[in-house]
Image (cartoon, rainbow, N blue to C red):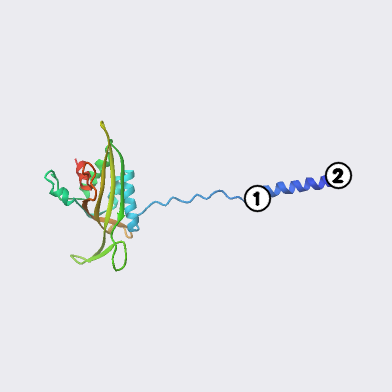
Amino acid sequence: MMAGRKHQLTVLCLMVVLAGCSNESLKLPPIKLPVIEPDRTTIAGLFDVFQDAHQDREIDSFAECLHPEYIFWFSEDDRDSPSWNWNDFINKIEDRDVTDEMFEAEIVTDIQIDFTNLTFDPDTLDLWIHEDTGDPEPFTYYWGVFAVDMHVVEQTEDGLIDHWVDGRARMYVRPDPAFEGLWTIWKIEDLGNEHKATDDTSWSGIKALFRK
């Protein structure tokens, strides 16, 4: 009888061990979700790519966000300042060169830019205002007013300088003429700083700072 009980206990133990092994074999490895990179297939994605291009200092990605007819208008405050000695606006090629100077500057230790949409269509509550134009050919564009929070940090002999932009800009977007389904920034109008930093930095002023 004792031998029979020992045999039963041995069989039971083996069944428990096998059951444990079976449960272990059913456990699946953790699933790694793919990292979804922002893209320009939506207007929100366009601005995500534009922001990431600044943070990662990717000049080609920055330029791809811009429409071939892109223009950056400097703020009225800067243009009216007696110390302002630059143009009223710059085109895509000029802005690419200026931005590349900022991206490549060893003295610049950090670049951050964030946008908050402030524009709502009172009829549809859409985030963007839609416009149509027919001269010389009809095309569609959208515009909105954005809060701009931008930091360009420089390491100087006297310490860190944070060129802080806390302002607003009117942003215009149009479909990318070269790639169907993608969006580009057509125009940027710097509306100046809402709360100026100690050195009165503006988005326009940062571009002026890094021109050749």
**Residue type (three-letter) at the residue carrying disc 2:** Ala
Residue 44 or residue 191, whichever sits in front:
191
Q: Left or right: 101 with respect to 22? A: left
User: Where's residue 158, x and y in %?
Assistant: 25, 31
Name the residue at 32% across, 47% down. 53
Q: Which residue is labeled 2 in the image? A: 3
Location of residue 57 in the rendering, given as x and y in whole percent from the top left corner: 31, 43
SS assignment at label 1: helix
Q: Which kind of residue does numbered mark 1 sit on?
A: Asn
149 relative to 105, above or below: below
Q: Quadrant of residue 162?
A: top left
What quarter of the picture does the C terminus occupy? Answer: top left
Q: Residue furthest right?
A: 1
Residue at point 56%, 48% (across, down): 29
Depth check: 95 or 126 in front? 126
Relative placement, left or right, of 173 versus 25 is left
Q: Residue tagged by mark 1?
A: 23
Q: CA distance from mark 1 to mark 2?
A: 30 Å
